[in-house]
Structures are given as structure tokens and as C-alpha cells.
Amino acid sequence: MSNENLLSIIVPVYNVEIYIDDFLSDLYPQLNNNVEVVFINDGSLDRSVDIIFDKTEILPQHIKANIKIVNQSNAGVSMARNTGLALARGKFIAFLDPDDILEKNYIYEIIQSLNKHPEIDILSFEASAVSSNGNEILWSVNDSLPNGTYYKDIDFLTKVFKECSWQSWLRVIKNDLLKDMEFKKGIILEDIHFFVQLYLKDVSIMHTKHSLVKYRQREESAVHQTNQKIIDDYRTAIDFLKSFDKHRHFTDHSLKKIYLDYYSHVKNFSGLKKSIVLMYKEKPPIDVALKFIYFYFKQL
């Protein structure tokens, strides 16, 4: 397998100047001729893109040649990723967010795995959720999945859907699989809509136990806000997961976690009574209701 354009990394950029310098300091020393990076500046109002240009300009020419910086009017992270997908030339696609912290072996481990197993469609790995300053590890992500390569493996897919970690930056995907796919515009939790469909196709998946990304828990990020928009988008994700009649034995596992987050947002926004009324009306699985009540009283 030729290494030429083996991996494309798509990075949406929007108002991240306080993180982007550190991100580039993690990423740029790891780059080689096999890797292209596609930055999509989604209408940033700060100096994010200026910092990218400045740090890119001093790179060796053979590395700089594989870096694209594209500007577009603000359209949201989904549309930025879709723009990146249209431009990416790599045989495999990775997604990163510029507030992520990369381990020093991020690219090395991915390239090693893809070279050893060129037949795979998806490579997934582990990550750590960390405090906003990056100093404290809060929990592990994807660590419930076993190391190995899987194809139509019911036990492995069950574990994936129970884990319910659908973040874009947790995996690398063969570009050919993505030709007719795009991220849904204007919603939060867009990763669920995108990757659940992908995992339910006939794909071969390799999981490695290497932890390659540190995921900042930022209070200002969209998924940590509580408002009617995010409640509506959780409801949309629930309806989406319930739509897979032939695959409910998988999707119901993720559905339980999404239900819990949904009712928690409703409680925080409209009060406990509203969330209880919704549970009575919508009749989620009984263990969802019991867990919600348990977590509520645990926080008192």
C-alpha cells in the first residue's frame, strides 16, 4: 500500500485563538509526507486563522505543501466538516477539533495501524476527557472496547453502542465510505447522526487501546449548555436512534444514554417536574427512569 496521501485530517476552526497555538504545537511536529491537514476557517472573528498562517509559513516546504487553509462564511461545524470532506485527498479521514490536546504519538500510531491493516474501513482508539486547562484527567473514553479487528461482530458492535462515544475525533475512516455522506447542518450531536449510520453498514473496524486525544471539557461548549435548542436536538437524536427498526438491538443501547442526557437537560432548563412529566408521557426504558432518579437524589 502506497503511503501517498494516506491520511487527511479535517479541522474546523471557529474563534479558538486561545487554544490554536497549543494545538498546532502538538500537531505540526508529527506531520510527514503521508499526511495532509485541511483547516476550514468557519468565519472566525478572532485571530485563529492568522495564527495558523503564521505557524504554517515557517514549516518545511514538503510539509507546508500538504496543508490547506480554507475560509468560509460561518455555517457551523457540520458544514465546515462537509467542506473539508469535499477537499480531502487522503485514503483515510480523521477529524480533530482545535481545542483538542494530541498525544505525541497520535499520527504515528494511526499510520502504523493503517499500514499494517490497509483492509480496514474504520480505525477507532481511546481518549481522555480532561479539565478545560488540560491538567486533570476526568475519565477515559472508548476504554470499554477490546483491542482487535472486527467485521459484523455482534458482541463488538453491542459494546460500541453501549459506549455511545460517537465523537468525530475518536476514529479514522476510509474516504471511499464517506463519498455519499455528510454531516447534518444546524444541529448539535451531529456526530451521532453521521457515525451511527456508518457503523451499521458492512464495515470492518479495528480498535486500538492507545489513548491518542485529550478532550477538553469546556463549560462554554455547545453540549454543556442547557437551552431549548440542545433539548430539541437531543429529541431529534432520540427519534433518529429509534428509526432503525432492524437494528434496535444495537441502537437501543445508545438510546438509553441519550435519553438520560436529554432528561437531565430538561430538568436543568425547566425543572424536575417537567422531566418527570415527559418521562411519564414518553415511556423510556424503565432503567433510564430509575437511573435518572438515582442521579437526581445523589446530587442532593
Image (tube, rainbow, N blue to C red):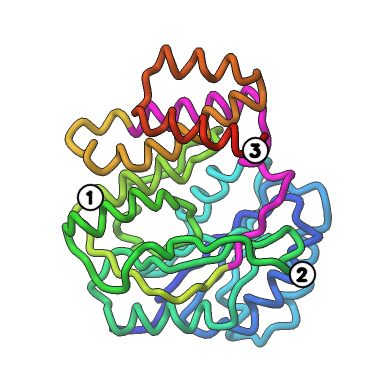
Q: Which residue is mark 3?
A: 299
Single out the mark in the foreground, 3 or 1.
3
Query: With 280 as the anchor, is 131 left or right in this view?
Result: right
Q: Is residue 188 above or below residue 10?
A: above
Give the mark nearest the N terminus, 2 or 3: 2
Q: How far apart, in angstroms, are the residues tagged by discs 1 and 2?
A: 38 Å
Tell me the SS state at disc 3: helix
Q: Is residue 119 above or below residue 33?
A: above
Number of marks in picture = 3
Query: With 253 as the anchor, is 235 left or right in this view?
Result: right
Residue placed at 65% from the left, 41% from the top? 224
Q: Specify the quadrant that holds the N terminus.
A: bottom left
Residue placed most toward the observer, 24 or 151: 151
Q: Position of residue 40 (x, y in %)?
A: 62, 55
Tell me the SS state at disc 2: helix
Give the magenta range.
214-241
The amino acid type found where label 2 is placed reads Asp
Q: Main secondary structure of the magenta part?
A: helix
Residue placed at 69% from the left, 83% from the top? 59
Q: How far apart, in angstroms, are the residues tagged by discs 2 and 3?
A: 38 Å
Q: Residues within 10 Å of mark 1 (few under 14, many from 20)?
A: few
Give the mark nearest the N terminus, 1 or 2: 2
Give the mark nearest the N terminus, 3 or 1: 1
Q: How far apart, in angstroms, are the residues tagged by discs 3 and 1?
A: 40 Å
The tag on residue 21 is: 2
The amino acid type found where label 3 is placed reads Gln
Q: Which residue is mark 1?
A: 201
The amino acid type found where label 1 is placed reads Lys
Q: Residues within 10 Å of mark 2 (few under 14, many from 20)?
A: some
Residue placed most toward the observer, 99 or 51: 99
